[in-house]
Image (cartoon, rainbow, N blue to C red):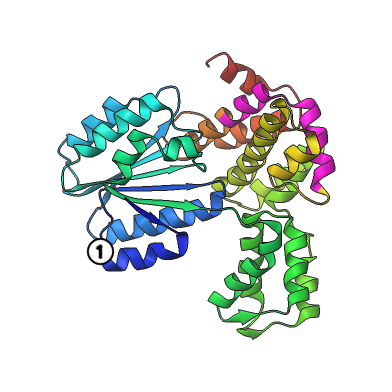
């Protein structure tokens, strides 16, 4: 078993000549960092000739035998393939054991990449997971907590040859309120606005506080605050500006996952304030997220997560439907307004 930190992944790939091992499992409650790590494995696999990629979402319709059949099937398009398995929640024992069996039978020209939320100790110590990670790497990526966020932003700026003073980094961290995707967007924006080198504090402050344009986090704020008219205006603005559906969906899904984690902690008996802190909700967001928890129960949040997954499939062209109408259903559900689309989904439609 090789357990790696996120920072060790590139070095590990370099040691193997850029060829991923038979199995790579990436686990994190930070969607951005998990996606970035998975992207590096995908890029390495493509460079090594694994040109075909098949994605399996672990939901009610997932069948491990279908994955095993695909692993052993001959491809019409490429001699090397990457099979990707995406877990939205905790992997169960039955699926885990079947997945381990399938992984142990992988042919030499097939690689497996699995992504999941952070694994609890029982899962990480299970026999089936041990069988999997003996075949390759387990990359567990911790969350970036509030105290480390300013430093993380500074590191991201430094990658592009820019630097900012401590006060400026704290300002950006406070603006994004713990959301790494929003932090990365701010870093990308600064890279477009300013040349490399030391950033002017006043200019950065003006850029960071300029929120005149629509962004996905305006939409999330309105939906979580229970303001359907404003949320729909934001969604219409994003669509009119040509914002990519995956960007909007990611921001919405992250809010739903955050609320679901907080609801789970609350239902387990922890006070709402503690549940929100455990879900990494800080500052001004605490009040609106606490209000959202009063109107959204765990069952509704699970329905919303399924609706997000369906929207993702529509956006990828593997399910029928209108991606923007599907996004609208998620927005209205998050804002606490009954949605025909969500009601149909709950009924199995």
Question: Residue drawn at (57%, 50%), measured in percent from left and top?
Answer: 30
Question: Residue drawn at (70%, 82%), measured in percent from left and top?
Answer: 199
Across and down, in percent, residue 109 comes to 17, 48
Question: Residue drawn at (72%, 71%), measured in percent from left and top?
Answer: 169
Question: Residue drawn at (64%, 17%), measured in percent from left and top?
Answer: 343
Q: Which range is magenta?
A: 285-305
Mark 1 residue element: loop
Residue situated furthest bottom in the rendering: 197
Asked if residue 51 is positioned above or below residue 340 in the image, the reply reads below
State the residue position of label 1. 16
Asked if residue 268 is positioned above or below residue 193 in the image, the reply reads above
Residue 9 appears anywhere in the view: yes
Residue 227 appears anywhere in the view: no
Residue 144: image quadrant is bottom right
User: Total number of numbered labels?
Assistant: 1
Disc 1 residue crowd, few under 14, some 14–19, many 20+, Cα 10 Å: few
Camera-nearest residue between 217 and 258:
258
Camera-nearest residue between 310 and 160:
160
Residue 289 lies within the magenta run: yes
Across and down, in percent, residue 205 comes to 79, 72
Across and down, in percent, residue 22 comes to 25, 48
Camera-nearest residue between 249 and 154:
154
Q: Decide if residue 174 is on the left or right side of residue 88.
A: right
Residue 306: image quadrant is top right
Residue situated furthest top in the rendering: 347
Residue 192: image quadrant is bottom right
């Amino acid at each position: 078993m090789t357990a790696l930190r996120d920072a060790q992944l590139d070095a590990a790939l370099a040691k193997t000549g850029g060829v991923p091992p038979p199995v790579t499992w990436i686990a994190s409650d930070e969607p951005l960092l998990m996606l970035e790590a998975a992207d590096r494995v995908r890029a390495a696999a493509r460079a090594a000739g694994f040109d075909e990629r098949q994605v399996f979402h672990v939901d009610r319709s997932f069948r491990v035998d279908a994955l095993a059949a695909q692993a052993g099937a001959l491809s019409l398009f490429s001699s090397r393939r990457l099979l990707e398995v995406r877990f939205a929640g905790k992997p169960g024992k039955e699926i885990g054991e079947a997945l381990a069996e399938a992984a142990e039978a992988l042919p030499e020209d097939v690689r497996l990449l699995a992504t999941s939320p952070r694994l609890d100790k029982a899962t990480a110590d299970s026999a089936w997971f041990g069988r999997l990670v003996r075949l390759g790497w387990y990359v567990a990526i911790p969350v970036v907590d509030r105290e480390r966020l300013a430093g993380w932003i500074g590191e991201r700026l430094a990658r592009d040859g820019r630097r900012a003073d401590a006060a400026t980094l704290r300002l950006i961290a406070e603006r994004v309120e713990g959301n790494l995707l929003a932090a990365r967007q701010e870093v990308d924006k600064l890279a477009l606005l300013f040349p490399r080198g030391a950033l002017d504090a006043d200019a950065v402050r003006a850029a960071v506080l300029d929120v005149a344009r629509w962004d996905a986090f305006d939409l999330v704020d309105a939906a979580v605050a229970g303001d359907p008219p404003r949320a729909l205006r934001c969604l219409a603005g994003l669509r009119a500006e040509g914002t990519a559906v995956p960007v909007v969906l990611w921001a919405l899904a992250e809010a739903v996952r955050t609320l679901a984690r907080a609801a789970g902690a609350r239902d387990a008996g922890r006070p709402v304030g503690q549940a929100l802190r455990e879900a990494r909700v800080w500052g001004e967001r605490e009040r609106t997220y606490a209000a959202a928890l009063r109107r959204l129960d765990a069952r509704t949040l699970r329905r919303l997560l399924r609706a997000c997954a369906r929207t993702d499939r529509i956006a990828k062209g593997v399910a029928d439907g209108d991606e923007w109408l599907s996004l609208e259903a998620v927005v209205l559900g998050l804002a606490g307004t009954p949605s025909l689309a969500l009601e149909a989904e709950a009924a199995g439609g």
